Amino acid sequence: MFSWVNRLRQLISMKPQKIETFYFDLDNIPPCPACGSDDVAVFIYGKPPLKRVILEGLESGKIISGGCMIRVTAPKWHCYNCKNDFGRLR
């Protein structure tokens, strides 16, 4: 009868799931597959912890904030040379 109420109760009673943290290595960013440039940045999504490496990466342009919404087609890297977004999050 009230299936949405039952579903809401089920969601409320669920234990929080651990969300995997996105780890990245700024020293191992691949070159752009389109133009071969090494001027590539990594996207981060969600609300990252305010750690020194992340803040420095955002200031230098090696890290780009992709926003809070993580799409299935969200790119992993961005090439500044040819404006190509490539790679996919897993």
Image (cartoon, helix red, strand yellow):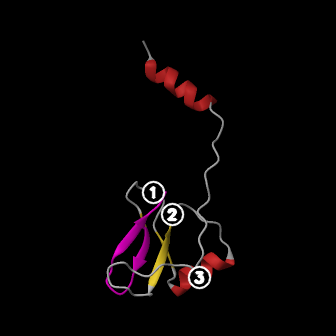
The percent coordinates of residue 51 (x first, y second) are 68, 73
Mark number displayed over residue 5:
none
Residue for badge 2 = 45
Residue mark closest to the camera, 3 vs 2: 3
The percent coordinates of residue 82 (x first, y second) are 31, 84
The percent coordinates of residue 86 (x first, y second) are 38, 70
Residue for badge 1 = 70
Residue drawn at x 56%, y 79% is 28
Tag 1: residue type?
Answer: Ile
Q: 48 or 21: nearer the eye?
A: 21
Q: Is residue 24 magenta?
A: no
Residue drawn at x 50%, y 84% is 61
**Residue 73 occupies quadrant:** bottom left
Residue drawn at x 65%, y 47% is 18
**Residue 32 occupies quadrant:** bottom left
Tag 2: residue type?
Answer: Tyr
- Who comes first in sequence, dot 3 or dot 2? 3
Q: Which residues are magenta?
A: 76-90
Q: 15 or 27: nearer the eye?
A: 27
